[in-house]
Image (cartoon, rainbow, N blue to C red):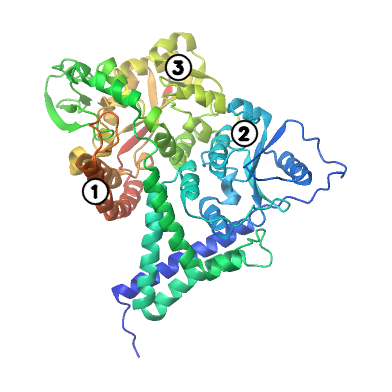
Amino acid sequence: MTHPPLSGVRWTSAVLLAALGAGTVRAALRLRDLPVLPVVPPTSAGVPRPAGWRLLTARGVEPDPATFLAACAYAEGEGLRVLDLLPADLAAERALGLLRLVDPARYRWDRLGEGRGAGFAVLVTEEVLERAAVDPGGPRPAPAELLALTRRLKEYASDATGLAVAPGLSCAGPGDPGGPARAAELRAQGLPPGALAAAQLGGLALLAGVAVRQGRWGAAAAGLYWLQPYLVLGGSGSPLRPADLARATAARPVRSLRAGLRTAGAARAAGRDDVPDGARAAAYREDLAAGTDRFLEARRPDCPWCGSVRLSVRVRVPDLLQGKPGRFTLERCGDCGHVFQNPRLTTEGLEFYYRDFYDGRGGEGAGTVFGRLGAAYRGRAEMLLPHADPVSWLDVGTGHGHFCNAARAVWPRTRFDGLDMGDGVREAERRGWVETGYQGQFPEFAPKLAGQYEVVSMYHYLEHTRDPLAELDAAAVVLAPGGFLAIELPDPESRMARLLGSAWLPWFQPQHQHLAPAANLREALADRGFTVVAEEHGPAHQGNDFFGAVALTAARLAPDPDRPWGPPATRRSRALAGAVRLAALPCFAAAAALDTLRTAAARRTDGGNAYRLLARKDAG
């Protein structure tokens, strides 16, 4: 007897059931990996004197001395400098939320992972507190403030931060997982409370629908969601024993609905944290009073790479990254294929269009994006493995030093220094992500650093510079004979550039001023005494072509209404932005799927939207 195939509706139940099952198993496995502090009586011999440690606690949390000593002993034994302590009776939904965010087995070693915790107590060395400029003697923080502090502290102990269950630490109560406090906690962790609440409510509605309409498949999916807290946390060997487990399981749908509604309401009431302040908006109005033409130089008639006058317009776009006023043109050389901004930005224009992107208003978002590129950073670092064992490495255009921090996992004995125009390089130095941070222009530093480095890297840096050939000259000066120059750039010859047109993200206007084909760069390196020893296209691919196109198109249709350089936000502009974002959600989902396929194809065919070159400086 043959069975009819599952209908489209039943497939929805099957997919939900599979997703919930996978999430339940993952949470249970992660729970098993949570370490538990040993019980250490305060009078036990061998307990290290807790000098140099501070225990930061949220308001109302009072750990006993034994817990403090046990935490110090565990942290010292594991070589940790930051340790978040989880109450053994942590509320069920909070525990599940933490297990969704953190894999305890990998958390410590994920140098770019964001700091996570329960928001009750954090043990920190005084040395880390000093570098992070945290005053441990101030008023006790709220849980949301302690979560934000934990996130920050991991940046200063990127491979020495852990978490552990403290049996002697107890919650003040089970707490309500929704409402203003929960919205504040999500924001403190860099998570959007409004979007997460909407996803939670949408998921509940979908589960209710399949439970009513789809028979046993739908009932199984809804039942698995209902029982998930007990299935994950109810085992006899669980290191967490939530005080509210029975209530959280029995009333989960109702509690989740109430929490989602309260969190969504709190998010709307609080509004955006980055609504422009008066001083910032006034400064932008003053900058724009004279128009944007002054931010552009005169158009040049020839190619800056080869001097040809055979130029044609490649693309014209506004600022889709931030929505600042202005329109920008990229032209292509008909002889060498070089693509460049023409007319290019003045130095004043660069300051205007970079402002609030990598720091200020956009700093946290940019840091989050860079922090999620760990696989790309590792691929860049591993490109050197067959060719060198460097002692010294200078990363030019280092930003906040994310690459250097990640590359230490590949090159633990290498000294990483960083150079950048922004203040982030100083922060990278304080975090310990670079040994020395140089702030300024690379060509200006080159004579002072002549011959000092075995590796110089320029990852997605040259396209931002006004004169990339001068940057290559500087690299030749700074490198010792036999040293290596590693470069990664967007590939203007990518097929996706032609397919997506002005919505191709790597055009990145107005920041990208030069996009050089690989052949041009190879020739320029040869002219400067370099031999290219490796070239990668597929491995350098950044899987964001379709996702980026959707994001840029959405920004073009409905720019951020609260941008301080735009007109004052109105109810209509906010409604339009919200409607466009909602309509774009299925487009983002489809784009993510297409990017997955595109990335797989790029890896197999060695053809992506970027390329890497590794060149050796010839001796003599």
Amino acid at pointer 1? Val
The Cα atoms of the two marked residues, 1 and 3, are separated by: 40 Å
Tell me the number on the disc at residue 596. none
Q: CA distance from mark 1 to mark 2?
A: 42 Å
The quarter of the picture where the C terminus appears is top left
Q: Position of residue 386 (x, y in %)?
A: 50, 35
Query: Cα distance, mark 2 to mark 3?
Result: 35 Å
> Would you place residue 520 above or below residue 70 in this image?
above
The image's mark for residue 580 is 1
Q: Quadrant of residue 30?
A: bottom right
208 to 316, vertically: above or below = below
Q: Does the rendering let one see residue 233?
A: yes
Question: The residue under label 2 is which amino acid type?
Answer: Pro
Q: Is residue 311 left or right of residue 285?
A: left
Residue identifier under label 3: 439
User: Quadrant location of residue 142?
Assistant: top right
CB atoms at circles 2 and 3 under 8 Å apart?
no
How packed mark 1 is, by other alpha carbons closer than 10 Å (few <14, some 14-19, many 20 or more), is some
The answer to whether residue 613 is seen in the rendering is: no
Measuring 19% from the left and 37% from the top, which residue is drawn there?
502
Q: Are marks 1 and 3 in contact (CB under 8 Å)?
A: no
Residue 554 coordinates in the image, percent (x, y): 24, 44
Q: Residue furthest bottom?
A: 1
Q: Nearer the viewer, mark 2 or mark 3?
A: 2
Mark in front: 1 vs 3 = 1
Q: Which residue sits at x=52%, y=41%?
A: 114
Is disc 2 placed on a helix, strand or loop? loop
Secondary structure, mark 1, is: helix
Residue behind mark 2: 139
- The percent position of residue 67, horizontal first and vertical second, equals 75, 46
Is the residue marked by circle 2 packed among few (<14), some (14-19), or many (20+) residues within 10 Å? few
